[in-house]
Image (tube, rainbow, N blue to C red):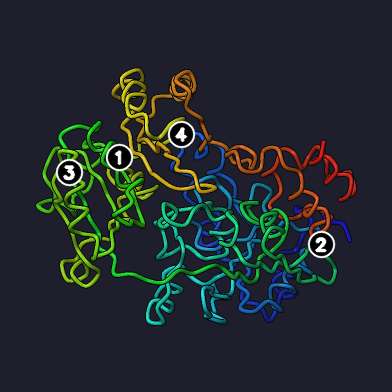
Amino acid sequence: MTETLQDIDWVAIAAELAPVAIIDEPVLVKKRSRDFFWYSPILNAQLKKSFGDLVAQPKTREEMAHCLSVAHAHDIPVVLRGGGTGNYGQAVPLKGGLIIETTGMNRILEIGNGFVRVEAGALMADINAALIPQGWEMAMFPSTQDIATIGGFVAGGSGGIGSIANGALREKGNIIQLKALSVEAVPHEHVFDAEDALQIHHAWGLNGAITEVTLRTVPTRDWVGCMASFDSYRDAYAAGYALATSKTVARKLCSVVDARIAEYFPRLKDHIRDGKHLLVTLVPREDMEAFGELVSAQGGAVDLALGEEERAAKGIPHVFEFAYNHTTLQVLKSDRSATYQQIGVADPSDVDSVIAVEEAIGDDVWHHHEFARVDDTLIAADLPIIWFKDEARLREIDGIYASHGFTVWDAHTYHVEGGGLKDADYRHLAWKKRMDPKGLLNPGKSRAWEMVRHLSADDIEAKAKD
């Protein structure tokens, strides 16, 4: 059956979706059509008027399969949505249609030796809360763990708190298995193990509706949230590099934050020294003495060091809420004229290059670096606060970074190829052809798909080998 969206009777579709719960109130549908794309003024202008037509809220894989079957029968575009914490419009329905909200599929199915198996809509915070009493914790999680779902993280994320110790999400062993439904008359659940799961990971829900995730876990430790302060950004960055490469101090987070950004952290007032650059980290309690010595050797001081119970008693946020893109959010809470970018540092050990590009760009860019490990290699990424003037200035800033040997992973595009993870690999699109032959999942988010959608899955996959 072929219909245009203008022809669709959404009241009839809602009835056909029964017994799945639906949301049809326009104000609520519009809210479910948004994620954190407004971090980017460019994306905000492009996406702020893109809305779905109806929201379905399945509670089981059978209900999700029913939703996909109805969408297939009526050629309805589908966008999968978890907590809506993506920054690039991953959960925004460019073509309207059906939004499938997965948060009702939230069961923790199995906790085993070094793994956890959960439904796609389970919240990251709930998973960690279930793991820790059994001696485990997630290998990594985003700073938005309180509202982010595991399916959304796998479909749209790449790393986070824990990546300095355990690598990127895509590294061998971190994703053990994914299960995803196809969009067909009778949807089938496909199992993707290990390497094959990478074709579903970070594909923004383009090539399958994730139903279940099995991830690696690691033994839990008594982590202490720490903030150390420094007189210069050079010293803070050097301390971050020293911590990231330390053989004596373990860490689950290693962030460096410009003092001007720290002024937007009012809940830390009287806990950290004013006007200082910060090293933000999580260190195991048994390594605290060595951490203090490391900070002192770099000319800094440990201002804040709280275990989980101490932190909760004082009412202070987790330190990771001042890291990754939560740092951007802290500024945006006060001033919406800010934005950010994603920059790869060519040589994490070269603090001179970091300071040189800072001086070349100017005062409308405030730097913030995250250290992580990818393929067992230390990387550093700059997620700076940028005081947005216009797109011309933003691209000038990108150019200055590039001229200094830095890599720009553009945060201001809603195409999956824009961030650098799927830009030259057609294998995930071959799976899209198999799993979503009509191209109904998240349409408009892949430039490459529009060029190959007419091909067979085997021919698409062959392009990956060219």
Residue at the outermost front position: 247
Nearest to N terminus: mark 3 or mark 2? 2
The residue mark sitting in front, 4 or 1, is 4
Q: Is residue 6 above or below residue 420?
A: below
Secondary structure of the residue carrying tag 3 is strand
Give the CA separation, mark 3 to mark 2: 58 Å
Give the CA distance from mark 3 to mark 1: 24 Å
Query: For mark 1, does the 10 Å Cα neighbourhood hold few (<14), some (14 to 19), or many (20 or more) residues?
Result: few
Q: Which residue is mark 1?
A: 335
Comparing labels 2 and 1, the label whose residue is closer to the camera: 1
Q: Which residue is mark 3?
A: 229
Q: Which residue is mark 2?
A: 74
Image coordinates for residue 385, horizontal then vertical, percent = 35, 35
Q: Nearer the viewer, residue 68 or 352?
A: 352
Amino acid type at image mark 4: Ile
The C terminus lies in quadrant = top right
The amino acid on which the numbered mark 3 sits, given as a three-letter code, is Ser
